[in-house]
Image (tube, grey):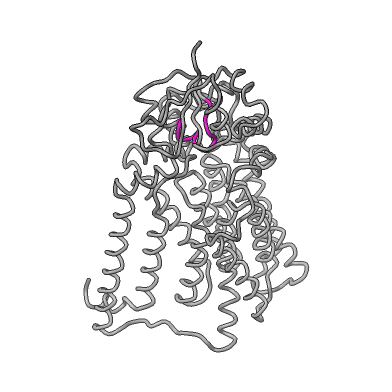
């Protein structure tokens, strides 16, 4: 690094680099989400067998039509897995998360310190739902779409023509494209209200541009059919949210648990945004109000929406917090250049932080740490047993493990897995009744000809089978160290 460039490495620039290094480190996590694995298996199938239009992975609904909305991202996930395994999946998450937060940073107001402060809060809120799944593309594309709308509204830079191809791409990566339309419709409604109540305001989008936003949205809806599933893709979000079983026993579709500390950054961002709006003299923009309040409401309904709220609320938080500081004259002017000594100190500081982050990431992703973490959430030992012993199926399995079983023991078609849109309410309710050992569990196993049961140790069904003469425990064996899972086989008369 030459002398002049070193002098441009101010404390503000150094801190910004440090913030993004820390965000990347925060987002680097061991892949333990069971849904990751059925996406990988689907990506492999698509590449080797062709596009999936009917279920090839279960024996309960095998051959039933299935709209595989994430086919594009599944191919990417499978490719990443083949090239770099668990490390690749971890870096997939951290790259997409950091890229999304970079767009959020560009939308924020104020100096580097204020933006960095808000970005850390927003990332802490969103990070609860960062994992190696197709939803990471929705996170990134949500930030990009909002940035395009930000340029149009606050910078008077028209890049609206990018939205239709962005939405067409999104529709081939993940069903979270519905978030894009929420942002578009919310922005249009907000600008209509701005033109009614604050026409001529500095940041109000003119009516002519609002009409263009409407046209772009309509074109975006039309191009969604550029998809292997054509027009069916548009109905998928509505079908998914109508599944009552999602709210019954899938955590990310439940309202946030505010007793858990992982939701506190969301609470801080929510209350901080409303507090900053109330304390500043800056007029609350209708678009900001609709998007923040709308995504906050969705987050209170289902925790999985908190990441979208963080993308929307973080810039709005800075708009009003910056206004509060400016009103009081508490403004720090950025330093353009520093002394050679300070520049060298900044280089040393940056080097130490980057090296420390590298050490942390390597420590997190070493083979032993990955194995220990995955054994806590995934049935690794069970799949090793099944592959070695090959007991006879068909198999009844835990919902939580279905995705990993589909990946790790493909010779056993699953009874159920995380594709809730495929199975539907009635089937999932019956699975839950059986898995808890409720009325009719024996009838369900008999009807489907189940010979093998793979469930959590201590589950209701495990307790029923342990006392039933028609079943015997085959795993864990005396030599196995596994308190997580049990496997029962039907006794042959």
Q: Residue furthest left?
A: 2
Residue 351, image x, y percentages: 26, 69
Q: Residue furthest bottom?
A: 329
Residue 399 drawn in magenta: yes
- From where the camera sits, is residue 30 visible? yes
- From where the camera sits, is residue 151 visible? no
Residue 457, image x, y percentages: 49, 37
Q: Residue furthest top?
A: 493
Q: Residue furthest right?
A: 196
The span shown in magenta is 396-406
Q: Name the image quarter holding the N terminus.
A: bottom left
Residue 397 drawn in magenta: yes
The residue located at (55%, 35%) in the rendering is: 399
Give the image quarter of residue 306. Answer: bottom right
Q: Nearer the viewer, residue 225 or 58?
A: 58
The residue located at (38%, 73%) in the rendering is: 15
Considering only vertical position in the picture, is 378 above or below 449?
below
Considering only vertical position in the picture, is 335 above or below 139?
below
Number of on-image labels: 0
Q: Nearer the viewer, residue 161 or 344?
A: 344
Residue 404, image x, y percentages: 45, 35
Give the image quarter of residue 46. Answer: top left
Residue 293, image x, y percentages: 68, 62
Q: Nearer the viewer, residue 171 or 400?
A: 400
The residue located at (46%, 84%) in the rendering is: 332
């Amino acid at each position: 690094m030459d002398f002049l460039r070193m002098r441009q490495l101010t404390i503000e620039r150094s801190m910004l680099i440090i913030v993004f290094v820390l965000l990347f480190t925060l987002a680097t996590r061991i892949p333990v989400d069971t849904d990751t694995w059925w996406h990988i298996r689907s990506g492999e199938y698509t590449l080797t067998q062709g596009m999936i239009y009917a279920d090839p992975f279960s024996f309960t609904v095998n051959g039933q039509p299935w709209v595989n909305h994430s086919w594009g991202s599944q191919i990417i996930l499978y490719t990443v897995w083949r090239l770099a395994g668990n490390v690749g999946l971890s870096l997939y998450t951290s790259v997409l998360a950091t890229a999304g937060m970079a767009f959020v940073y560009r939308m924020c107001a104020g100096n580097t310190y204020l933006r960095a402060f808000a970005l850390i809060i927003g990332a802490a809120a969103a990070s609860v739902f960062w994992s190696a799944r197709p939803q990471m593309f929705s996170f990134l594309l949500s930030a990009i779409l909002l940035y395009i709308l930000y340029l149009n509204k606050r910078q008077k830079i028209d890049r609206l023509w990018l939205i239709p191809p962005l939405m067409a791409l999104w529709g081939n990566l993940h069903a979270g494209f519905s978030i894009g339309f929420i942002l578009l419709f919310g922005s249009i409604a907000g600008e209509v209200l701005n033109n009614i109540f604050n026409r001529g305001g500095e940041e109000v989008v003119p009516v002519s541009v609002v009409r263009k936003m409407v046209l772009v949205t309509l074109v975006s809806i039309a191009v969604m059919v550029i998809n292997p599933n054509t027009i069916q893709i548009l109905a998928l979000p509505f079908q998914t949210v109508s599944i009552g079983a999602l709210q019954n026993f899938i955590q990310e579709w439940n309202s946030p648990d505010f007793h858990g500390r992982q939701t506190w950054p969301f609470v801080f961002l929510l209350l901080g945004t409303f507090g900053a709006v109330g304390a500043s003299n800056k007029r609350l923009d209708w678009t900001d109000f609709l998007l923040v309040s709308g995504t906050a409401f969705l987050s209170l309904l289902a925790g999985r929406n908190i990441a979208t709220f963080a993308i929307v609320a973080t810039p709005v938080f800075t708009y009003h917090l910056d206004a509060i500081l400016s009103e009081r004259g508490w403004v720090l002017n950025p330093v353009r250049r520093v002394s050679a000594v300070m520049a060298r100190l900044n280089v040393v500081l940056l080097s130490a932080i980057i090296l420390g982050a590298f050490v942390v990431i390597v420590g997190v992703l070493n083979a032993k740490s990955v194995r220990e973490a995955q054994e806590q959430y995934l049935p690794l030992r069970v799949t090793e047993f099944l592959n070695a012993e090959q007991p006879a199926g068909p198999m009844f399995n835990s919902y939580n493990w279905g995705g990993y079983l589909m990946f790790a023991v493909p010779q056993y078609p699953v009874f159920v897995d995380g594709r809730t849109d495929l199975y539907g309410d009635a089937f999932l309710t019956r699975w839950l009744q059986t898995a808890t050992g409720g009325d009719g569990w024996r009838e369900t196993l008999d009807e489907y000809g189940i010979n093998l049961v793979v469930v959590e140790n201590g589950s209701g069904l495990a307790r029923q089978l342990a006392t039933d003469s028609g079943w015997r425990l085959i795993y864990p064996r005396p030599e196995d160290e596994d308190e997580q899972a049990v496997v029962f086989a039907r006794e042959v008369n």
